[in-house]
């Protein structure tokens, strides 16, 4: 089934996206390979946070520069993504260390029942790493969308100053943000269907204090925060770079 779907995906990307679609397919599987490498590294006891940061940097670079080449808009997006990544790391570090939401919940016991519980890595670090990798996929798309659109605005009106360009970037970001938030929300709802079926009949208080629920809501809120922050940061860096490059 995976092979068939991959062939369909590849065919559609090449037919519609041409050479860019071909590169998209290749980078998608490259990023998938990087995630598998990350899982292997933490499974042998290496630091999950450090390697998550490294993976996020590599994924950002391959996605931005591999698909859009090295230019002003991709370099601006990359800088903005690194700034937001640092902020989210600090936020998730405190969340992971003090929220006590790491590890597995009750509905996972059947799936992991046959495995050893003598793990050689810190599940808190794994949680933080998971949050970072989850966020990076959200902000890459938003950042390059703002940067590319702002670049087009400047090409068509090169007499705009940095303040006007920044305002344009914020207006573009506002339009993108609404769709991004909806996409993230419905992705979470889809993941939660199984969770609510498992806990059908439980009280509202029990559900909102349940570990899996708190983790998923935390992931959603972190994605929202990152999606919002990336807009003004990308707008500022890109507008400044465009004026400086004049």
Image (cartoon, rainbow, N blue to C red):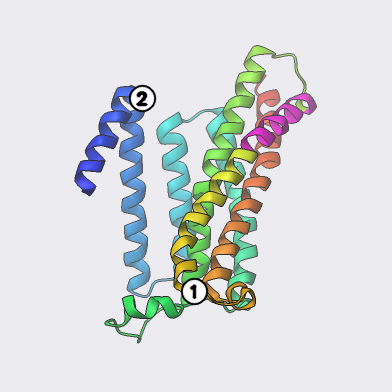
55 and 113: which one is in front? Answer: 113
Reply above or below: 174 against 222.
Answer: above
Residue 173 falls within the magenta-colored stretch: yes
Q: At which x and y percent is residue 58? A: 43, 49
Mark 2 lies on a secondary structure that is: helix
Residue labelled with disc 2: 17
Q: At which x and y percent is residue 187? A: 50, 51
Res 79 → quadrant: top right
Mark 1 lies on a secondary structure that is: loop
Q: How many marks?
A: 2
Q: At which x and y percent is residue 153? A: 65, 19
Residue at the image position 63 percent from the left and 58 percent from the top: 221
Residue 125 falls within the magenta-colored stretch: no
Q: Which mark is residue 16?
A: none
Q: Is residue 139 left or right of residue 239?
A: left
Q: Is residue 144 left or right of residue 157?
A: left
Q: At which x and y percent is residue 76? A: 59, 35
For the C terminus, which image quadrant? top right
Residue density around tag 1, few if under 14, some if 14–19, many if 20 or more, within 10 Å: few
Reply above or below: 137 against 7.
Answer: below
Residue at the image position 45 percent from the left and 68 percent from the top: 197
The dominant secondary structure in magenta is helix
Residue at the image position 60 percent from the left and 65 percent from the top: 92
Residue labelled with disc 1: 199
Mark closer to the chain start, 2 or 1: 2
Q: Gap in Å between the C-alphas at discs 2 and 1?
A: 43 Å
Residue density around tag 2, few if under 14, some if 14–19, many if 20 or more, within 10 Å: some
Res 27 → quadrant: top left
Q: Which residues are magenta?
A: 163-177
Which label lies toward us, 2 or 1? Answer: 1
Residue at the image position 47 percent from the left and 37 percent from the top: 64
Q: Is the Cβ of the residue at disc 2 closer than 8 Å to that at disc 1?
A: no
């Amino acid at each position: 089934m995976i092979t068939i779907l991959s062939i369909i995906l590849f065919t559609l990307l090449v037919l519609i996206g041409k050479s860019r679609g071909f590169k998209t397919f290749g980078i998608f599987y490259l990023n998938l390979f990087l995630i598998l490498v990350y899982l292997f590294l933490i499974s042998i006891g290496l630091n999950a946070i450090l390697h998550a940061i490294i993976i996020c940097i590599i994924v950002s670079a391959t996605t931005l520069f591999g698909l859009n080449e090295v230019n002003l808009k991709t370099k601006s997006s990359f800088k903005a993504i690194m700034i937001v990544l640092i902020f989210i790391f600090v936020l998730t570090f405190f969340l992971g260390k003090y929220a006590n939401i790491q590890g597995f919940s009750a509905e996972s016991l059947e799936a992991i029942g046959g495995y050893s519980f003598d793990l050689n890595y810190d599940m808190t670090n794994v949680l933080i790493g998971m949050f970072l990798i989850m966020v990076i996929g959200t902000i890459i798309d938003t950042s390059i969308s703002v940067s590319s659109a702002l670049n087009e605005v400047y090409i068509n009106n090169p007499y705009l100053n940095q303040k006007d360009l920044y305002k344009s970037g914020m207006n573009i970001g506002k339009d993108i943000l609404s769709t991004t938030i909806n996409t993230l929300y419905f992705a979470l709802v889809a993941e939660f269907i199984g969770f609510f079926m498992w806990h059908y009949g439980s009280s509202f208080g029990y559900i909102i204090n349940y570990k899996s629920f708190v983790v998923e809501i935390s992931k959603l809120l972190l994605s929202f925060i990152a999606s919002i922050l990336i807009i003004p940061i990308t707008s500022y860096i890109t507008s400044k770079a465009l004026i400086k490059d004049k």
